[in-house]
Image: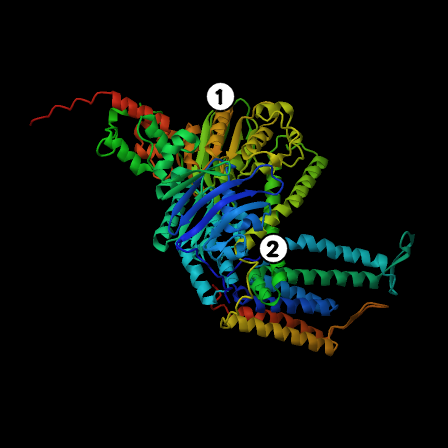
Amino acid sequence: MQRPIVVQRPPGDPVSVLRFEQVGYRYPGAAVASLAGVTLTLEEGEFCVLAGVSASGKSTLLRAACGLVPHFHGGEFSGRAVVGGLDTRDHGPGELATVAGTLQQDPETQIVMGTVRSELAFGLENRGLAPAAVARAVEEVALALGIERLLDRVPDELSGGELQRVALGAALAGQPQLVLLDEATSQLDPVAGDELVGLLRRLNEEWGTTVLLAEHRLERCLPAADRVIALAQGRVAYDGAPAGFQRWAAGAAPELRTPAANLLSGVGLDPGVTGVKQARAALRSHGLLADDGSLRDHDREPEREPAPEVTGWRRPVSRRRTVVRGGAHALRMRGVWHELHDGPAILRGVDLDVRPGERVALMGRNGAGKSTLLRHANGLLAPTRGSVQASGRVALLLQNPGDYLLGERVADEAQPAELARAGLAGLGDRHPRDLSGGERQRLALAIVMGPGTLPAAVCLDEPTRGMDRGFKDQLSDQLRSLASRGCAVLVATHDVEFAAAIADRVVLLAEGRTIADGPAPEVLCGGWYFAPETARILRGAGGALLPDQGAALLRRRADSPEPEPEPEVVA
Amino acid sequence: MRYRRRSTPLHAARAAVAASYGVALMTCAVLFMSPVVLGALLVTVVAVAGVARAGDELRRILPYVAPLAVTAVVLNPLFAHQGLTVLARLGNVPPFGELDVTLESVAFGAVAGLKLLVFTLAFALMTATVDPDELLRLARRVSFRSALAASLATRMWPVLERDGRRLAEAQRCRPDAGGNENRRARLARGVTVVRAVATGALDRAMDVAATLELRGYAGAHRPPRLSVPWSRHDVAFAASALALLAIVVAARILDIGRFDTYPTLRLALGPRELVFGVALITLALLPFAERRGVVR
């Protein structure tokens, strides 16, 4: 039987799904409050994006909305939070789960059952729903999220993206009034990320579900949002429409602005746009884009070198991984296959050459084989067919930098010179866990780079997951510096904007095969999903990937005279 | 080792029935000491694992259980000083005293090892073929808090396993973890990883517990009874389990499969034992003859 919950709506406020009144919160033992005087109201059917740099209080606000703060985490809580008519001081997360579905950052710890079907059914069974209703809800949510083929699979066999969708399914199965999502797209490839945002919008429009989505990649979700709440140091710094947010961010928080807003600012236009469509309309209305939305041919940059040929199946050369010092390539892979025993082939005859100092982004959907390829480059895995050659050591930074940090002090992990190089001098006595996400990443990178000579290549697996733009800029600078010293850089990433910022070449994988390999502008300008926002706005014109490049291109167009019309040929 | 849904009659049976079938096989291993019966049971378990496509799971556990079985064979003669047939007189061996290795004590150790092997393999077979979620659901109807603890434990194991794999992989990426690292350094690194996984277990448990909270587990009530109609596989395996238990009890009453080790070896090996062994194998394998409707 379902446990009866008395929902008392305040008079005159019949549709507020979430109401915070002067909410403040400090984690146990923390010196600084994570939330301070937060007052906000979410109405039924709103799609709200929660923006802010790392540690601004986004996750804590979501935890306060689902009841984990203060019931689970303890600490000092002040003010009043009411979710679906339930005061969080009187009702714990279990009761609040009937009105608010929550999806947290790490999908691995959000799966508690042995099969996907049981996972989706678990919350509903706990609410005492009849078996037939549970079965129907499971089927419906699985179909809605496209995970129906996973229903009888065990979670351990699923990729990070699949796990994320299953966890989202578990949060949505009960059709909650409010969905709280913390960096829900951080593990997803661009296609799955866009699909997820589209699905949330559909739930929002068709079911009236209120969505509160904390996200760093704002360009992905702003077009779907009705409202943006920006947090800074635990306080609400902005609360209003997405277009107004872009204008506000231009002055108050430039690191939160989207590439579209930066592009428009770069050409002196109002940055108050929320997506590609609005940005194009703004540019067209100022004559910077032609009526058909294109730039003229004479604005295009000169032709670049042709992309290396993508070859098909090759005969395996050797199963060995060799180090050939002084070669022309930092890393060379020939016909690399990785076939699981009693399972599928993860890599299928991949050829890849990376020159010293080259910066390569490895992209593709979840499960395309990117992480496996990096493990082959480093030698953690040996190819079942084919060969891998490196001109020296290949450093590999895996997805979780914390996995490298097992010592009690930062100084135990790396030598003082390495810490200084990583900008961590003076932090030697701190515990690695007390470092910020960015500092931990830098320390882990310093560890894998080692104290001696620079490695031939450094590979990074999803280094920007859950990181804000400020950190990404720092990492870009660091990788550029390494490449300028002759170290090849190979980054597997779902973050198209980051790939556009650091890569001079992009390799696109699909089902273990290379489907595109070429200069970054060539690969990233041509697609729908694997294309940065600037390239989508300008339809790939001039190979511009970043707002600065796009703005420069548009300014050149504005300054250049219209080409003379060609004389009409009269027959 | 964990459950994976496969297209076999045993996987198609409901969890309660499949578990009863596994318990029947384990009961048989517990009640008999006869090497003939245990041998027949070993054949049964291996054959069932083969047709239930759980052979890999059994193979995976064998390296862990086989040394234990061998240990039983080696240790028993050291501690059991009974038996009349002396194989070797080892004299005064501290701390065992006057040590005579007898045929009977060796045989007892061997049978104990075989029993341990059969029981563990039967348990592994059950683990690989019974849906733990369905079992936990049944447990929630009986004891809520125990089921919660079991939910946490069953989920924590694969999470920690994956953590350990990830940490070990990260440690292998350190430049000082090259191929020329000596055994001692490798061991020290392994200990560091195990320690890190153990200390991280509390954090992981907190994460999983938070998820359970968010799924409403703390406030949940007894789940409603599911009225799923009995499939042909439910009926077949329930009948097989009952029949197995019945013949095991009958065999004990009729003193079939008697085996005495001390003071001298006495093994009952006649037509009754052979029939009993064949009956065990046949009854256990019969439900697999029906393959209609095995895909869920």
The x, y position of residue A258, in whole percent, is 39, 34
Tag 2's secondary structure?
Answer: helix
Using a 10 Å C-alpha cutoff, classify the residue at mark 2 as few (fewer than 14 neighbours), some (14 to 19) or many (20 or more). Answer: some
Q: Residue furthest front?
A: A11
Tag 2 subunit: B
Tag 1 subunit: A
Residue at x 75% of width, y 55% of height: B70
Cα distance, mark 2 to mark 1? 49 Å
Residue at x 50% of width, y 29% of height: A331
The residue that label 2 is drawn on is B152
The x, y position of residue B288, in whole percent, is 54, 68
Residue at x 65% of width, y 26% of height: A415
Using a 10 Å C-alpha cutoff, classify the residue at mark 1 as few (fewer than 14 neighbours), some (14 to 19) or many (20 or more). Answer: some
- The vertical placement of A248 against B94, above or below, is above
| Color encoding of the figure | rainbow
- The vertical placement of A486 against B242, above or below, is above
Q: Quadrant of residue B66?
A: bottom right
Q: Amino acid at mark 2?
A: Leu
The residue that label 1 is drawn on is A484
Q: Nearer the viewer, mark 2 or mark 1?
A: 2
